[in-house]
């Protein structure tokens, strides 16, 4: 099961992460997505949250993402966390608007 939140900025993201941890989500299972890869990495580091990697995606998708465009990579990562293809496309469009998407997973 997962929970998805959309945030406008890093301050809102931090508040959302605090709420998710209070609801029982572990920080390693909370993932922050931004369309800009550097912003995503910076926020992940600053909030000490999880990073979608080989564990979530598997070797094939992880290697494949090195050759994908950023939008394709983000949709693949969303799907690896359990979102449907339609949801992944929807939230990738939210990222295009400059917003942040936070996914809490308890699986």
Image (spheres, helix red, strand yellow):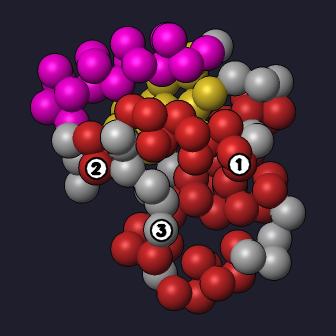
Per the image, the residue denoted by label 2 is 28
Q: Earlier in the sequence, mark 3 or mark 2?
A: 2
Q: Is residue 53 above or below residue 88?
A: below
The reply to whether discs 1 and 2 touch (Cβ–Cβ < 8 Å) is: no
- The residue at 80%/56% (across/down) is 70
Q: Is residue 69 above or below residue 105?
A: below
Distance from Cα at disc 3 to Cα at disc 2: 12 Å
Pinpoint residue 13: horizontal percent, then vertical percent. 48, 20
For label 3, the crowd category at 10 Å Cα-Cα, with few meaning under 14, some 14 to 19 and many 20 or more, is some
Instruction: Report whether 97 appears left or right of 25.
Output: right
Per the image, the residue denoted by label 3 is 53
Q: Nearer the viewer, residue 92 or 45?
A: 45
Per the image, the residue denoted by label 1 is 37
Tell me if residue 81 can be seen.
Answer: yes
- The residue at 60%/79% (across/down) is 61
Judged by its main secondary structure, the magenta piece is: helix
SS for dot 3? loop
The range drawn in magenta is: 9-25
- The residue at 28%/49% (across/down) is 28
Q: Is residue 13 shown in magenta?
A: yes
- The residue at 82%/24% (across/down) is 97
Tell me if residue 105 can be seen.
Answer: no
SS for dot 1? helix
Pinpoint residue 74: horizontal percent, then vertical percent. 68, 54
Distance from Cα at disc 1 to Cα at disc 2: 19 Å
Outermost residue toward the bottom in this view? 60
Q: Is residue 50 shown in magenta?
A: no
């Amino acid at each position: 099961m997962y929970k998805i939140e959309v945030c406008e900025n890093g301050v809102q993201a931090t508040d959302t992460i605090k709420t998710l941890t209070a609801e029982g989500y572990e920080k390693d299972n909370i993932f922050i997505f931004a369309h800009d890869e550097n912003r995503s990495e910076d926020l992940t580091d600053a909030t000490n949250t999880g990073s979608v990697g080989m564990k979530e995606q598997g070797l094939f998708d992880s290697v494949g993402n090195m050759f994908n465009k950023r939008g394709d990579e983000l949709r693949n990562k969303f799907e690896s966390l359990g979102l449907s293809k339609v949801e992944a496309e929807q939230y990738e469009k939210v990222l295009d608007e400059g917003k942040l998407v936070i996914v809490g997973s308890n699986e």
